Image (cartoon, rainbow, N blue to C red):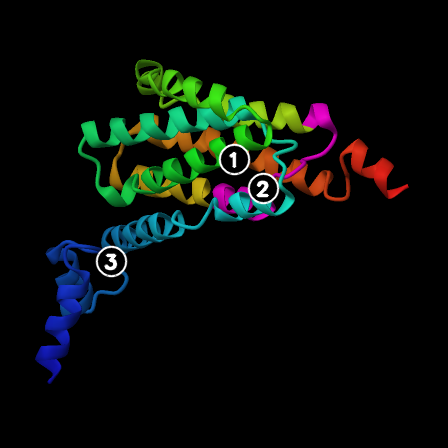
């Protein structure tokens, strides 16, 4: 019975979360303080958790736009640049044979970002024009691959929009804080799984910029768009 349980655990963990040598180190020799193997387990677990969470992370933003029937306060240019950056991250990671657990969320975030992009254009009555512009933005692949789309530009555009408006409009707090937490975790997983300073540096900058937007959400929490304030009066 014990052997069957051990075999089932091994099939579950190897090679998804641990290489076989680390499985033996932790669960056969019971060396539970073996730091290198623990770092691998933590990194793989975090990476897969981020990928799984990415299936839902931007849905609160989608639902908030649909519920309000408005995309007020959202920067369309920032959303389109985010789409380019996510595509660049995917292609760069695939080209360098990075494990799926280190970049997989980019695929699911890209699909959700496309949805948000079309919703923003729809509620601004720019659907036809935007549908024509979207492929042009996606074709900037060489720019995206040169530095993974410069995520600092992406988030700073949204931060500048928030500052200019004096409110965060239909920006979803849930999505922003999930992206902030995910980018922080990605710093560790990128170092551990890829060893690529460009990937790790990208997430350091992304964390700082996402943190700025999260801080703006808290600062403008009770701020309303001017036209809404007039209606309330």
Residue holding disc 3 = 34
Position of residue 41 relative to residue 5, above or below, is above
What's the mark number on residue 65? 2
Query: Residue 164 colored magenta?
Result: yes
Q: How far is the residue under mark 1 from the one under mark 3?
A: 49 Å
Viewer-nearest of discs 1 and 3: 1
Q: Helix, strand, or loop for circle 3?
A: loop
Residue at left offset 56%, top offset 48%: 174
Towards the viewer: 45 or 213 = 213
Mark 1 and mark 3 lie on one chain; the one further toward the N terminus is 3
Instruction: Tell me where residue 185 appears, x and y as whole percent.
Output: 41, 45
Q: On the image, which quarter does residue 15 sit in?
A: bottom left
User: In what element is the residue under mark 2?
Assistant: helix
Front of the two marks 2 and 3: 2
Q: Quadrant of residue 17?
A: bottom left
Q: Residue at x 27, y 54 (%)?
A: 35
Residues at circles 2 and 1 in contact by the CB criterion of under 8 Å? yes
Q: Which residues are magenta?
A: 163-181
Image check: 223 left or right of 22?
A: right
- Which residue is located at x 13 percent, y 74 percent? 6
Could you say where residue 40 lies in the image, as x and y percent from the top left?
Answer: 25, 51
Quadrant where the N terminus lies? Answer: bottom left
Helix, strand or loop for the magenta stretch, by majority: helix
Instruction: Kindly identify which numbered label has been placed on residue 198.
Output: none
């Amino acid at each position: 019975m014990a052997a069957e349980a051990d075999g089932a655990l091994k099939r579950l963990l190897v090679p998804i979360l641990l290489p076989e040598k680390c499985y033996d180190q932790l669960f056969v020799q019971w060396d539970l303080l073996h730091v290198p193997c623990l770092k691998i387990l933590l990194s793989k677990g975090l990476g897969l958790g981020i990928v799984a969470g990415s299936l839902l992370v931007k849905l609160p933003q989608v639902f908030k736009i649909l519920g309000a029937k408005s995309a007020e306060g959202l920067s369309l240019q920032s959303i389109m640049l985010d789409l380019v950056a996510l595509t660049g991250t995917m292609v760069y990671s695939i080209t360098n044979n990075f494990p799926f657990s280190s970049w997989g969320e980019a695929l699911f975030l890209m699909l959700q970002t496309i949805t948000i992009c079309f919703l923003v254009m729809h509620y601004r009555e720019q659907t036809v024009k935007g549908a024509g512009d979207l492929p042009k933005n996606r074709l900037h692949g060489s720019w995206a691959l040169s530095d993974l789309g410069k995520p600092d530009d992406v988030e700073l555009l949204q931060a500048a929009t928030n500052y200019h408006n004096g409110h965060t409009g239909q920006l979803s707090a849930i999505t922003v804080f999930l992206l902030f937490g995910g980018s922080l975790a990605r710093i560790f997983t990128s170092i551990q799984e890829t060893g690529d300073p460009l990937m790790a540096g990208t997430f350091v900058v992304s964390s700082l910029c996402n943190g700025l937007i999260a801080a703006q959400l808290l600062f403008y929490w009770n701020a309303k768009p001017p036209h809404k304030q007039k209606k309330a009066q």
